[in-house]
Amino acid sequence: MKWARKASVVSIIILLIFIVGICLAIIYRMDTENTYKVVSDNFHQMLIDKQKRRIEEVVDIVYSQIEIEKARLEKDIDYYLQTFGNVFENIEIKDEIIREDFEEQLGLQQSCDQLQADMIIWDSKNNSVRYSSNRALEGIQMSQAELAKYTQGFAKHAIRYIQSKDTVIIFGLTKEAIEERAKELALNDIRNMGMGKDIYIWVSEILDYNGGTDYARCIVDHTMPEREGHLLSTYRIDKTGNFPYQKELEDIKRTGESWNTYHYKKKDSNDVALKISYTKLYKPYNWIISAGIYIDDITAYVEENSNYLAEGIKRQIDISFINILGVMLFSGTAGSIIWIYHMKKEKQLIEEREKISKAHYKLLEEKYNSGNTIIHDIKNHLICVHSLAKNASDDKVIEYIESMNVEIEKYRHTVITGNEILDVILSEKLGIMDQNRIECELDIEPIDLSFIKLKDQVSLLSNMLDNAIQHISHKEIKQIKFITYTFNESWMVLKLINTCDQQPKIREKRFLTRKLEKEGHGYGMQIIYKVTEYYGGNVKWSYNEEISEFSLMVMLPKPKC
């Protein structure tokens, strides 16, 4: 009876919907042209609003990446300062230091140049600087007090004493040097960011908040890289009389961000087109981070599909008159089918959740039981091994120990992270990696993925790991590192790093497979993009040719309560 009542209610609702549909269809037929115009305008505005949201998200991602790179550099510097003294453990500082040989022996020049750091070797007996990466200081007399004062100029530094503390080695970095290195890393990341062929990123550095000529300098421009280094002026005017840089600067000073519409030259063309841009100030560096899109790119898409849209509207109106009566007759059946499908789908989802949960708990139970069994029998095993060894039965001892190792080996790939889906998938993939002699490192910080549908979790995690395994290096070193962590309490990050012989080629968010049989392959990356974008996230990948390493990072925003 309950099922029948639900089916009847659904049928009545469908019937009412189609009755209203008849009335609407009549109205639409009377005013088809007006309907088309409204739909077309709304569609155009919808695309603009959607692209504006994308632009704002792109700027926020760039902003976050600068913060991430800055924090990572601070961590790397602290680690280097803690460990740099190890370089000198087995090195004897000779009376005469030959700069080139000394730097080559320790690799100092590269470290100093990369970090823009200064290293000093000071002789406490003679109060003199025996070596300095800053050639101007080398050989000068410097008292202990002068050395201490010089060291105070470093934002971060470390001191090591060698050869009975007669020789003092100081490695330090100024605040300016650290900031310049952080900027360099951030700019490299921004230049390599791929945010789609229609969205462009550019960054300017404010030199004078009062505006005027040369008020800022362009430091990154995806549209026209040749503009990098050019000075900007608030007096610049577009073809309609707007002062885009002046408005942008005024908004930045007032609110820290700016929306702007102006005409600008298009990439690889002499055409000037209307552009929408969003700008945000990164105050620590006085950087203006901007992203934009040309309106005519959106308009072209709308116009390209306008005829199809108009024909579709007319066709749907005509079809509605023909099909309404038939649909009304079968509304009861349709309602029943929809209800049955809904119940079946709900049951499948429940069974899927239960199946995954059972698999997870089975892993836990097997691990617990196997541990208890080994603990329970360990005494008996030791007595048996002792007896066999005492009787000099070497072969039997070896055979007995190997049989125990076989049992223990069964549970070697069991992983417990706190996430049911991740546990099951990692346990399977670790077995595959072991078969292919791939080293795997896990750095798992618990993250809550419960807001993602189970099937989407499986698709995302499985394809990330499968891509890493399939594109692993064919050389002797085969390594995969899987990292999860939370950033800024608002982003959850999944990161995979694997050795890879050559940079993968991606077209339309899809890897171009190198397998001879192309069909059915190369869709993993496409699925990763699809799932990530569905939940408002972003995908970023990079390839380091020097160390043959591929990195894939998925950033998912935490759902707001």
Image (cartoon, helix red, strand yellow):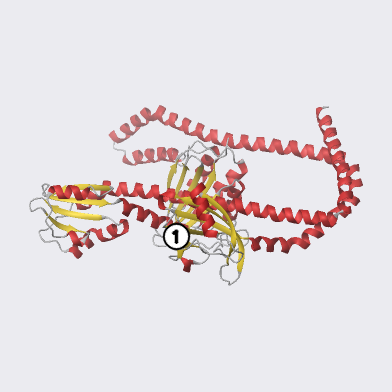
Judge from the rendering whether residue 354 lies leftward or rightward of residue 392; answer left or right. Answer: right
Any part of residue 16 in sight: yes
Look at the picture and state if 41 lies above or below 11.
Answer: below
Judge from the rendering whether residue 366 lies leftward or rightward of residue 129; answer left or right. Answer: right
In the orientation shown, which residue stands out farthest toward the left? 125
Residue under label 1, please give it: 216
Q: Which of the image's four quarters has the N terminus? A: top right
Judge from the rendering whether residue 163 lies leftward or rightward of residue 475; answer left or right. Answer: left
The residue positioned 17% from the left and 54% from the top of the image is 121
Across and down, in percent, residue 514 comes to: 54, 64
Q: Of helix, strand and loop, which one carries label 1?
A: strand
Q: Nearer the viewer, residue 539 or 218?
A: 218
Across and down, in percent, residue 202 comes to: 50, 59
Q: Residues within 10 Å of mark 1 (few under 14, many from 20)?
A: many
What amino acid is labelled 1 in the image?
Ala
Judge from the rendering whether residue 181 lies leftward or rightward of residue 24; answer left or right. Answer: left
The residue positioned 59% from the left and 37% from the top of the image is 356
